[in-house]
Image (cartoon, grey):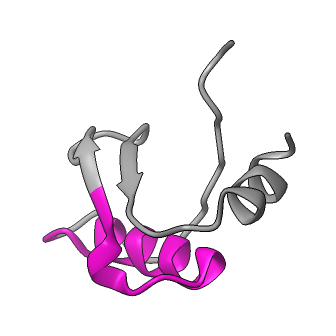
Amino acid sequence: MEPAVLIVRVVEPAVDGRANRACVDALAAALGVPRRAVRIVAGAGSRSKVVEVDGADPVGVAMLVGR
């Protein structure tokens, strides 16, 4: 099975980590978890990122990624 992919677009510029923070904020809000539960584990300096989320509802995640 291929990994789930979710496209997140933010308006913050990729300067001083602002876009990464906006991405984390958007994911936390969409998944209903605190901001501290979302971590960028790979790709912090790239357009493509790998994130880990603690405590997210698996059904909610599946709905967001279309599975």
- Relative to residue 33, is residue 34 drawn left or right? left
- Relative to residue 1, is residue 41 drawn left or right? left
Residue drawn 43% across the image and 37% down it: 48
- Residue 67 on the magenta span: no
Whole-percent x, y for residue 43 in the image:
27, 38
Whole-percent x, y for residue 5 in the image:
64, 37
Residue drawn 68% across the image and 12% down it: 1
Q: Is residue 62 above or below residue 37?
A: above
Whole-percent x, y for residue 10 in the image:
54, 70
Question: Which corner quadrant of the image does residue 9 belong to?
Answer: bottom right
Residue drawn 28% across the image and 60% down it: 39
- Residue 34 on the magenta span: yes
Write the start and end of the magenta stretch as one range.
Answer: 16-39
Is most of the magenta stretch helix, strand or loop? helix
- Relative to residue 27, is residue 24 drawn left or right? left
Name, please, the residue furthest toward the top.
Answer: 1
